[in-house]
Every structure is written in structure tokens, then in C-alpha cells.
Image (cartoon, rainbow, N blue to C red):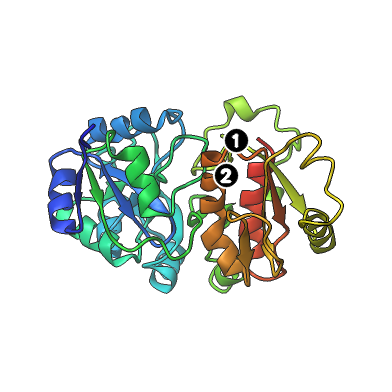
Amino acid sequence: MKPTAFLSDDPILLGKIIERGGVVVFPTETVYGIGASSLNFDACRRIYQIKNRPSDNPLIAHFANIEQIRKYCVVSQESLLLLETFSPGPLTLVLEKKNDSIFPPDRKTIAVRIPSHPAAMKLIEASGVPISAPSANLSGKPSFTRKKDVIECFQNLVDGILLADDPEIGIESTVVDMTKSNPILLRPGKTSEIDLRSIIPHLVLPSLQIPNENRNDLTELVPESPGMKYRHYSPEAKVVLLDEEEFLNLVYRNQPGNTITLESVFSRKKIGFIGFGFSPIHKWDRILATNEDYMKELYSFFVDADKLNLDICYCEIPKDGPDKYALMNRLEKAKNK
């Protein structure tokens, strides 16, 4: 079947598709996004249909610059300082809308960011409008970080795919709700808690904003940010987190010639490993040096796990450091599907 999407490395041509009400997949510095004009509500609703995304799961609007954000949003002094310090880059702020001219029309708030990927910035500038875009994946599945995966998945679902360098970071942006008296970290990302506290020391972490640990009220929750309410980041395989000793012991026991684990042979489980400094067993295993490597490789590992029909993904717990919190957030969500 001939692809229906227009594939091009020219952001100006793809920007015209956005301007005319089309849906385009494009790379950002975090992950790939699937976007439409934030001013075209029908086009934005089409994104939900393509992804099979729950209607109350918000989109992030991507802007060209701070002035464009101020046209549609109330930007406090603290929010302005955050934007000036960390944008363009992997930081999203939830702000109050000035009016209902921008999607979604039924909310008083909107999540906004300015991406730093050169192709994404050119796309927004060429379209002349903010672009509302969640991660380019099917709802509940891992986000895509490789060109080949978005083409395979979306070439017959969208109007265009922007061909450019793949994302450098590999996980979604940090999200901070700036509409409360104390800013709330809704989703950790590459812009770390330490980074944020240098500007907003009164930042509230997610664990402090959930009075009911069992979250029996989850069905009533109206999420302010993607990733808050629904299953996300998960491959079909079971995800198991292991500390360094557990991980290396399991890898050793599965090496050819060693005592093979009951799980991998007698139960005929197809497994994969992602972790630090080990000898790979399978061609799909991922060997990491740093947490930055982990961010960049995690989702593509999960995507490959689905393609290979793996039964279990064994994931080593990330190393200590500023990126660990965001990585553990994604791993825990993938584990608890």
C-alpha cells in the first residue's frame, strides 16, 4: 500500500499542511510528536482519534517563542523567568488561558512549551500557529524516538511526516503547573527538580499533592498534563526492575554455558535486558554507560520488545543523579500496567 502521508525534510512544506488543518508527525528534542494547529479544534480532535487517546488527556501546545505564548496565556513573573531560563527546551508549563481561541476550548488552562529541536522550531514558524502535539505513539504505548518507527506506525494515518534528526533526549518534557500558589511538578523530565528549584524553590513534588495513596478518586481526576491519569509508556512485555546486583546476577545466569534460569528456558520466556556495563546475551539487549543513555534508549528498547514479542524486559535501576527521578517515573509506570 502506498503511504498516504507526505514525507519530507522541508519544514516549510509541512508547516503549510498544519496551516491548512492537517496532522503532522515531527521530531522534538524529547520524543516525536503528532501535531495540528492549536487554533483548529477539529484538527486537534483528529489527533485523539488517530491515537485512540482519551478525550480528557490534554495536549501540549508548542510555541515559537515567549511572545507567542503571551498572546494566548497569562504568564506570571515566575513563569516568565522559567521560560527565559529553560526555553527553548524540554520544559512544559501549565498556564491560564486568556480566552477560548486556543485548544482545548473547555479548559481554563493549557500546557505550553517551546521546543529546541531546529526542525520543530522551523515547523512552528512556517505554520504561523501554535502546534498542539502529544507524543507520537498509540495511546498507552511507548513514545517513539526513531524515524523508522513513526513512519511504520503513522504513514497511513496522518497527512505528513517531517524527516529530520531523531530526538536527542528520549523521554517527554518536564511539566510544571504554574496556576497554583505553589508550583507543582506534574511530570519529571530532563529539566530536573534541582534545575527548577534554582528558580522556584517552593516547587511541590507529586507525592506531596496526592492525599489519597490509593487514588480511589482517579476516575474523577481531570489531568492537567499528559501522563497523569492513564497507563502510559508500557510495552506488552512484563517490565521487571532490578538493582545492580540482581541485574548482573540474572545476566550471568542467562549467559550461554551457565545455569539457565527456569524463567528463560523451562517456561520458554523470551527476555531482554537494558542496563549498565554487562555482556549482552541477545542482539536486542541495550548496554548503557550513563542515565542520559538510558533516557535515549528506553523507549526504543520497549518498542523493539513489542516487535520481537518479548515476554519480559529486565531493566536495571538507573544510577543516582539528577536524571534518575524522571527515569524511575517512566519505569514505574511501565511496570505498573
Residue at image position (39%, 71%) is 84
Crowding at dot 2, Cα within 10 Å, few <14 / some 14-19 / many 20+, comes out as many
269 vs 73, nearest the viewer:
269
76 vs 307, nearest the viewer:
307
Measured from the top left, where is residue 55 in percent x and y? 42, 28
Disc 2 versus disc 1: distance between alpha carbons?
A: 8 Å
- The quadrant in which residue 249 appears is bottom right
Measured from the top left, where is residue 237 in percent x and y? 64, 38
Give me the disc on residue 251: none
For mark 1, give the secondary structure.
Answer: loop
- Residue 303 in the figure: left or right of residue 202: left
Q: Quadrant of the N terminus?
A: top left
**Amino acid type shown at disc 2:** Ala
- The quadrant in which residue 188 appears is bottom right
- Residue 113 in the figure: left or right of residue 139: left
Taking the view exactly as shown, the residue that stands out farthest to the front is: 257
Q: Can you tell which of label 2 and label 1 is closer to the viewer? A: 2
Give me the disc on residue 305: 2
Q: Are marks 2 and 1 in contact (CB under 8 Å)?
A: yes
Residue at image position (66%, 60%) is 325
